[in-house]
Amino acid sequence: MRITDLIEKKKLGHALSEKEIQYLIQAYVSGEIADYQMSAFAMAVYFRGMEDKETASLTMAMANSGHMLDLSCLGNRSVDKHSTGGVGDKTTLIIAPIVASLGGCVAKMSGRGLGHTGGTIDKLASIPGYKTSLKEETFIRQAEAQGVSVVQAGGVFAPADSKLYALRDVTATVDSIPLIASSVMSKKIAAGAKNIVLDVKTGSGALMKTLEDSRILAQAMVSIGKSCGRNVTAMITDMDTPLGNAVGNALEVEEAIIVLQGQGPRDLRDLCLRLAGEMLALVHGGDGAYWEKEAAASLSSGKALQYFRDWIRAQGGDDRIAENISLLPHARYKREIYAPRSGYIFHTDTQKIGLTSLLLGAGRNKKEDVIHMGSGILLKAKRGDHVLQGDLLATLYTEDSDLLIAAKEELLAAYVYADTPPKAVPLIYDVIR
Ligand code: URA
């Protein structure tokens, strides 16, 4: 087989066979196919798309490109959750201990921040002492004993995806539905959980900006998961405004703890309970709504917070943060930003808010950049809120005071005002089983 023939075939809009896709991925991982050839192939997929069968073959070829985790010792208790990426999305930190407190086992690999979106592993790394990598045996044993273990994705798992993802990131081929679906699902299949809940974000802060595209992506991922013998539910959820009020690593851990303490922003709490309900319904059977109530009871009784403590301690972190959030890293400088006019916040360009947080030091521009764990934004007003001129909109946090001026401008540019409120949008648009 010749890579140029495969690029040509896709360029003309034809489907590749399973064998051709297997060759493509094996030869790319081994270095026989060069990055520039794979970039051309990814761009051809971006414009021509892939048939469902091709996307499934690509997923399996990438999942098989490395080690596959065997979680069979956890039986049907193993459950994973994956978000397609957003701003302020700290749900894993809340959901994992809730699900563990109700008999699920969340053995999960999470990514670093990507572009304007934050990454769970960066958030966890802001907890003093937390180990983001564990030996495989320890990882599984901890999930069995505590109900949660979360480590950094990549390494020996789906290395083809790590390589292709990095390439897509710099060749404008990230937002392709078959490439996203195969990227996400190859990691989920390699990570071994029997049950998977996908949180497919939609809106200005998501990779998929329209509901229609989000639905196509969700359906593609559910059908890939099913064809691999996994139980999969996808929820399409709002990312047209940040989730919760905190954006940035330690700030988000702080907000997650507040929710685990039984308070915190309503949107964040409600979404966590719904996602946890769906995860538990896959683990135990029954109705998501029933498990959502159980999840709420676990939060209000403090049981979920206890599981959070146990998880953090087991993974080397300072579990005293559960009571004393001042032990988390804090930024040296802060600046309050005020509303320039009165009115309703009609729209927030959520991608811009994510980029403001990145600019403040909470994310990376290059993959080797060092994150400032305390940097980020605490939002006071979001889409739909009414503000008066001079009201507090947000507080910026950073380690470098020189960044504050540019960040203030970027943040202010993310807000659109009107004299009438925007149409209310649902937190959850759809559930696809
Ligand atoms: N998340 C992933 O893991 N892969 C993508 O391609 C996009 C989001």
Image (spheres, rainbow, N blue to C red):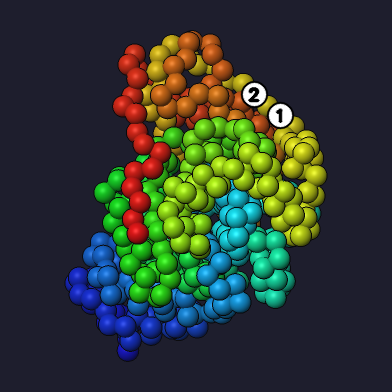
The residue at the point 36 percent across, 63 percent down is 222
Element under disc 2:
strand
Left or right: 387 as drawn, with respect to 305: left
**Quarter that holds the N terminus:** bottom left
The residue at the point 40 percent across, 59 percent down is 233
**Quarter that holds the C terminus:** bottom left
Q: Which residue is mark 1?
A: 333
Left or right: 95 as drawn, with respect to 321: left
Q: Position of residue 202 (x, y in %)?
A: 37, 45
Q: Residues within 10 Å of mark 1 (few under 14, many from 20)?
A: some
Q: Quadrant of residue 131?
A: bottom right
Left or right: 41 as drawn, with respect to 315: left
Viewer-closest of 53 and 375: 53
Q: Position of residue 31 (x, y in %)?
A: 49, 81
Q: Which residue is mark 2?
A: 335
Q: Residues within 10 Å of mark 2 (few under 14, many from 20)?
A: some
Q: Is residue 84 visible?
A: no
Q: In the picture shown, does residue 316 fall above or below 373?
A: below
Count of marks placed on residues: 2
Instruction: Tell me whether circle 1 and circle 2 mark residues in contact (CB < 8 Å).
Output: yes
Left or right: 209 as drawn, with respect to 405: left
Q: CA distance from mark 1 to mark 2?
A: 7 Å
Q: Position of residue 171 (x, y in %)?
A: 40, 59
Please name the amino acid that badge 2 sits on. Answer: Arg
Q: Position of residue 285 (x, y in %)?
A: 46, 61
